[in-house]
Image (spheres, rainbow, N blue to C red):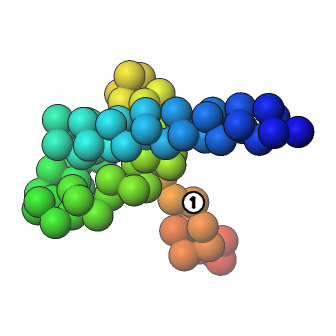
Amino acid sequence: MTLFISTALLIVSIYCAVGLVFGIVFSFAGGAEAIDSGASSGSIGFKLIIIPGCAIFWPCLLLRWIRKTSPPEEFSQHRRPSMKA
């Protein structure tokens, strides 16, 4: 049982360490600006604030950064055209 817990903690620790490094690089090396043009005017405070989120979601953000995909477009009721004629 302790081997399982030790292995699980090691995996989580590696994931978090890689995520923290990725979050710092992504925030300050232009990754955020590459996938979202709104982040280009972000201050140092903004870049520091997004690091924890980048650390958690680093696999998804890495794929978007590599593919250079734009952010998804919102499609909700207030964006749909009126159906009335």
Q: Residue at x 29, y 64 (%)?
A: 49
- In the image, what residue type sits under mark 1? Phe
Look at the picture and state if 19 lies above or below 44.
Answer: above
- Figure quadrant of the N terminus: top right
Residue 21 visible in the snapshot: yes
Q: Nearer the viewer, residue 13 or 72?
A: 13
Q: Nearer the viewer, residue 45 or 38?
A: 45
Q: Position of residue 58 (x, y in %)?
A: 46, 39
Quarter occupied by residue 43: bottom left
Q: Nearer the viewer, residue 28 or 80?
A: 28
Q: Position of residue 76 (x, y in %)?
A: 60, 67
Quarter occupied by residue 62: top left
Residue found farthest to the top: 66
- The residue pinned by badge 1 equals 75
- Figure quadrant of the C terminus: bottom right
Q: Is residue 79 left or right of residue 52?
A: right
Q: Is residue 20 left or right of residue 80?
A: left
Quarter occupied by residue 6: top right
Q: Residue at x 51, y 59 (%)?
A: 74
Q: Position of residue 24 (x, y in %)?
A: 26, 43
Q: Nearer the viewer, residue 61 or 74?
A: 61
Q: Residue at x 52, y 68 (%)?
A: 79
Residue 61 visible in the snapshot: no
Q: Is residue 60 left or right of residue 64?
A: right
Look at the picture and state if 84 lies above or below 29.
Answer: below
Residue found farthest to the right: 1
* Mark 1: few/some/many CA within 10 Å (<14, 14-19, 20+): few
Q: Residue at x 33, y 53 (%)?
A: 51
Q: Secondary structure at mark 1?
A: loop
Q: Position of residue 31 (x, y in %)?
A: 26, 37
